[in-house]
Every structure is written in structure tokens, then in C-alpha cells.
Image: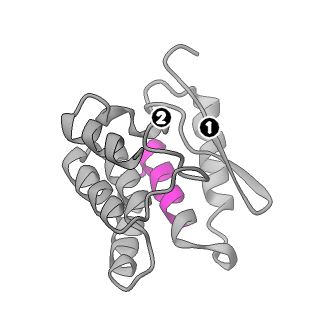
Amino acid sequence: MIGCRSSTVSSGASTFITDIGTPTSATQAQVRLMERLAEEARVPRSATPTREAMMARMEVMTGDREEARKILGALTNSSELGGAQPYPLALIHLAFGEKEEALHLLEKAYEERSIQLAGNTGSLKTNPRLDPLRRDPRFEKLVARSMG
């Protein structure tokens, strides 16, 4: 599919498609698969802030922005208590198209030294979910600082 990419993130027994491009570029089968996986992932026994952030992002991608806002609100409240890290919150805001808030949270993650350079969320330099920020000079400076 042109203009569509996917990356998988393993969490427990399930593998989730977390980035298929924009909802308009996703095929109906992909959307149905994401919806099924999102429903499966709602099992509370394994909910972590990072997994909830992935779910919120997936909800945005499948069009359930209201549910994503609820999850984001809960994660934002938990981050104030030391729960969710700024980096996954930035990915959710970016999925909503809120670049300024995403950049603010990425800066905060850098200052707190909580930016992951590998793992589920990927590096600032290579994470395709951050592509909408690539041409922003503030983001370019952040990438340069994080790479050392």
C-alpha cells in the first residue's frame, strides 16, 4: 500500500499494529484488525501507562477520538503522579495533530532523561511516528541534542 507503513510492538501475548499511516490510507481490513486488537487489549489485568498510551494512539488512528481523549486525560493525570512518561504522551498528542504539545512533551522527556532511544517507542531519530515533526527546527535541535 502506497504511503502506509506499519510497525509492530509486542506486549504480552499480543502484537499490536501501532502505526499504519493515516486513517484515510488504511484499508478497511487493517482498521477492522486494529479495532479487534484494541478491544482485545482492553483487558485491565495487563494495563500499563505505556500500553494505555499505545491504545490511545490506536483509538485516534481508528477514529475513536473520544475514547482516546479519555485515555489521554487519565494518563495525563497519572503522569502528574509519576505514572505515564512524557514521550508516549507526546506520541498521542502527535496522533491528534497537536504538534506544539507533542514538542513540549518531547522537550520535557529530554530534560527528564526519559526519552527512550530504543524499545517500544523507538528513537527520536528513527521513529516514524515522529515524522510530522521532522521539518520543525525545534525538533531537529532536540534530535541533535539527544544524539549527543
* In the image: residue 87, left or right of residue 13: left
What residue is disc 1 on?
A: 7
Q: Which of 27 and 73 is in front in this view?
A: 73
- First along the sequence among labels 1 and 2: 1
Task: Find out whether the residues at labels 1 and 2 contact each other: C-beta distance under 8 Å.
Answer: yes
Residue 67, disc: none
Q: Is the magenta stretch mostly helix, strand or loop?
A: helix
Say few, some or many: other residues with alpha carbon within 10 Å of mark 1 (under 14 / 14 to 19 / 20 or more): some
For the residues labelled 1 and 2, the Cα–Cα distance comes to 9 Å
The residue lying at 44 percent from left, 58 percent from top is 115
Q: Which of 78 and 61 is in front in this view?
A: 78
Coloured how? one colour
Residue 113, image x, y percentages: 40, 65
The residue lying at 30 percent from left, 64 percent from top is 111
Residue 33, image x, y percentages: 66, 41
Say few, some or many: other residues with alpha carbon within 10 Å of mark 2 (under 14 / 14 to 19 / 20 or more): some
Q: Which of 20 and 104 is in front in this view?
A: 104
Asked if the stretch drawn in magenta spans residue 58, the answer is yes
Q: Type of residue at label 2?
A: Pro
Residue 128, disc: 2
Residue 67, image x, y percentages: 41, 61
Circle 1: element type: loop
The residue lying at 53 percent from left, 13 percent from top is 2
Give the residues drawn in magenta, as a range. Answer: 52-64
Asked if the stretch drawn in magenta spans residue 121, the answer is no
